[in-house]
Image (spheres, coloured by chain):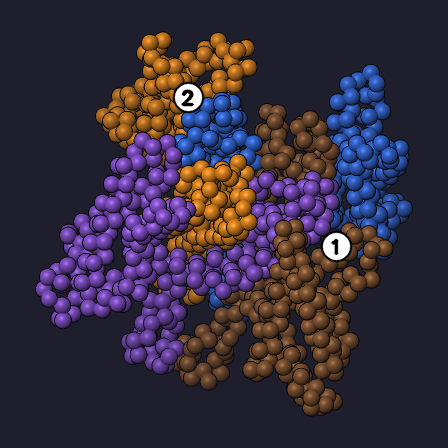
Chain colours: A brown, B blue, C orange, D purple
Amino acid sequence: MQEKTKNNNNLKPWQNKMHEVIYEAHTPAGKLFDIVLLIMIIFSVAAVMLESVPSIFKKYGEELIFVEWFITILFTVEYIARLICIQKPLKYVFSFYGIIDLLSLLPSYFGLFFTETHSLTIIRTLRLLRVFRILKLMRFVKETNLLIKSLSASLPKITVFTFFVLCLTFILGTVMYIVEGPESGFKSIPVSIYWAIVTLTTVGYGDIAPITPLGQFIASIIMLTGYAIIAVPTGIVSVEIAKQEISKKIFTRTCPSCTKEGHDSDAIYCKDCGSSLD
Amino acid sequence: MQEKTKNNNNLKPWQNKMHEVIYEAHTPAGKLFDIVLLIMIIFSVAAVMLESVPSIFKKYGEELIFVEWFITILFTVEYIARLICIQKPLKYVFSFYGIIDLLSLLPSYFGLFFTETHSLTIIRTLRLLRVFRILKLMRFVKETNLLIKSLSASLPKITVFTFFVLCLTFILGTVMYIVEGPESGFKSIPVSIYWAIVTLTTVGYGDIAPITPLGQFIASIIMLTGYAIIAVPTGIVSVEIAKQEISKKIFTRTCPSCTKEGHDSDAIYCKDCGSSLD
Amino acid sequence: MQEKTKNNNNLKPWQNKMHEVIYEAHTPAGKLFDIVLLIMIIFSVAAVMLESVPSIFKKYGEELIFVEWFITILFTVEYIARLICIQKPLKYVFSFYGIIDLLSLLPSYFGLFFTETHSLTIIRTLRLLRVFRILKLMRFVKETNLLIKSLSASLPKITVFTFFVLCLTFILGTVMYIVEGPESGFKSIPVSIYWAIVTLTTVGYGDIAPITPLGQFIASIIMLTGYAIIAVPTGIVSVEIAKQEISKKIFTRTCPSCTKEGHDSDAIYCKDCGSSLD
Amino acid sequence: MQEKTKNNNNLKPWQNKMHEVIYEAHTPAGKLFDIVLLIMIIFSVAAVMLESVPSIFKKYGEELIFVEWFITILFTVEYIARLICIQKPLKYVFSFYGIIDLLSLLPSYFGLFFTETHSLTIIRTLRLLRVFRILKLMRFVKETNLLIKSLSASLPKITVFTFFVLCLTFILGTVMYIVEGPESGFKSIPVSIYWAIVTLTTVGYGDIAPITPLGQFIASIIMLTGYAIIAVPTGIVSVEIAKQEISKKIFTRTCPSCTKEGHDSDAIYCKDCGSSLD
């Protein structure tokens, strides 16, 4: 996640210094930068949230708008700083974090252009999209490698599973639409499919619920199915995590004498031939 | 899933050509055929869904009926084509996909016969059964082997588990019917059993909920039981998937003498013929 | 589950014959007996269920009472038959199945004594307890060994876990009672604890739901906790099932030449020394 | 959990005797002390619960207050006894159990000072905090080591996962606030986030539910996501428990030269000092 650009001699010394502060976390200045950024992100998301509460907006509206612009300007400075201290600015611009950083700025500035002449909904929506600033937090997550690896390894299987579940909900939703009919809240097939998903995933809002005996019977079968097949993604992910953990353990040490693999990372002597591992 | 019929010399050249396009996906024409079919299925299911939404049916009713007949005719052509380009058409007719393909056509044609003279409910139900066309999608799923193997290996255990859960809900439903009575919504034992399933599977609609202290106490026990025993199918499937994954990995060594596969990775001699594996 | 009493010479021939039919399933007569018994149980439970539906009871009340007495008499004959064809009848009487079989009879006979002079609730309750007849079905479950072994091995850990969860719901329920108060439905601490269980187990009826911001915040934490700790029983059971499966595989064959254990059940030669396993 | 203080000769004989009874469970007196304590805790928590039920408080209010003071005095005696029979009383005062024991007393005594002159809410809240006495039960849990070890080993990964889930609910909550708006119950972003957590964790109260087609579509995606990602904590915990179980089993071989434990079952030489393990 942190590009290594230390031996880039094309950059001027102040750029290198700046790069160290912004992109690397092991210097005191770099750590301070990260902490300030972290606090800004949390403040910013909290401001978006509080703005939406009518009673709070009435009381502290002006303060929130001030905080909002203060943070927007800080993020703008951060974005420019990130651009000017690396060799390939375009690579950053189109990277995941570059896009997130830009998306964190745009809504506030767009808000200036779309004023009274435009629909209020668009402005409101744009302003609310600032919540995506929360994705800037992803930079601080370090322990995720194993989780992300396991999840992406499980992805193809989970996609197939989700596809099966979707097919099932399409069929079950249609059947329930036939059985229950519009009177019980199953107004159309899309709504019935929505209900089938609510039921199969064991969420169960209760805004729509079967009332005929046959409908309740079919609903029971859907619930038991949902209860049983929740095992499938769990099984997939468990096995993937287990595989990641095992490979982490096994692919660590090889004995230089007998070339036997699979020694614990803390082993000093080979457990098979007894010679030193170092 | 794709029958090998390349060296069938009983078929005429145009039949062989047609077979290649319809049943095999590795030629450009075959790929195009698959993509067109895929799009048709999605369109068809979408049409069934949209027809059921009253506001959409009012506006676009005629267009939807046109789309419907267009797709039905295409599927009819596909069905006939599949029949005439294979050696054993009857085998296809009674295969899983043959039945699905036929079921995708019949509802539309039946709709022509059951007109005003017949009950509208039957026609409506028949027409809605076209949603089973979604099963035609199954042809395109390839990565399912592991999932299907694990699930079918888990099936006997999960059936026993579901049987236990059902017995439990019968007893708990009856007990709750005694405790709560018809006033709280527990109108009859079948309804109470439905409620017990809703609760045990952690769906929890809330259309029926206990109101007496004793009822709430028993409900709490049911919920905690449901929360604990969800572990059982998950454990079963996890272990099955793990076994499939392990066997996939281990079952690679083959005996050079008897060509039997499936030897453990640490085996020195073939466990079937006793000759050295190296 | 099936006592071996073949070489009991204390029993008369007709008793041995009867024992074979009732307690052993491998003869045609034994199989027929099992199937008849299975059907009777299902009919009996169905009758209890249907009796509780007012509309059905009105129409078919007399038929249901007839079915009920027919089955009760059959079960009485079965109970007596089981008693007279074994050497130690008392052992059967106090066994799990003996108690279940007796409990299946008593409610019907008690119903005769507690007539108009007694409270209707007691009679109704007694009659409904016939639903426990469903436990007679347990006799037919054979594949449960692994499941039951895994569950009983997991029991101490799951009990500790449930104890933790209960402590948590007591504390969370009290906190929510303080935060939300009786106006939002949190009428008393027991009700709040009921709500905490409903929430933690992800059932979520919605009959009681927090309405204050602080209450919703605490509820969110409870939900996320419940969502995370559902992993614990699942993990426990998965590992137990895995252990059972592994031990099933490992404890099968030992090489007579090199005494190495762990050969597959289908192995013919030792995979370590190559000598025959038989 | 039980400090070993047998060979503390600084304590007088009666202190040693007292210490044995209070801190050690293997003598008859110690066992009796534990059982009495256990019953007192359960009574005490039951009293707090029953006090909150208006109908019970009206009838048995005085008895409950008597039970309350009786138990408070007993716990006070226990606290003083625990203090005077150990060498380092301060270490106990600031230990987990010391704090819990003190917290179990304070609310009752504070109740005496905050009388009519103070707000009733504070008194009520203080009195209710006595529910934390339930944590005194933790002393009696012994089999938890494995569970606690697995959970604390899983904690960093589960924290990262919960952080991801929270970010997701922030974004999804905001999107749903934009899509559904205040009319459907999505009054503000915090409320929408609360709804997103309710949905993602599959609790599903139904107090807030989407009513627009787009909202129901997004809600369906959230549910399927929640249904799929519940696999992640389960997978993490399963693998941790499996690791604990495996290490428990394997970590039995001890090197005879360096007495280091934890060698693999197939190791021939000690991995730490290189000498033969046999």
Packing grade of label 2 (10 A; few <14, some 14-19, many >=20) is many
Q: CA distance from mark 1 to mark 2?
A: 60 Å
D17 or B103: nearer the viewer: D17
Mark 1 lies on residue: A124
Q: Position of residue A102 (x, y in %)?
A: 74, 68
Q: Amino acid at mark 2?
A: Leu
Image coordinates for residue A264, horizontal then vertical, percent: 45, 74
Numbered disc total:
2
Q: Is residue A104 left or right of residue C255?
A: right
Instruction: State the SS at label 1.
Output: helix
- Tell me if residue B93 comes above or below residue A272 in the rendering: above
- Toward the front, the furthest residue is D117
- The image position of residue B75, as x and y in percent, is 83, 38
Residue B168 appears anywhere in the view: yes
SS at badge 2:
helix
Residue name at image x 65 percent, y 86 percent: A17
Q: Is residue C159 above or below residue D4?
A: above
At x 31% / y 19%, what residue is drawn?
C80
Relative to residue D68, is residue C263 depicted above or below?
A: below
Residue hosting label 2: C128
What residue appears at the point 58 percent right and 73 percent down from the top-left corner? A35
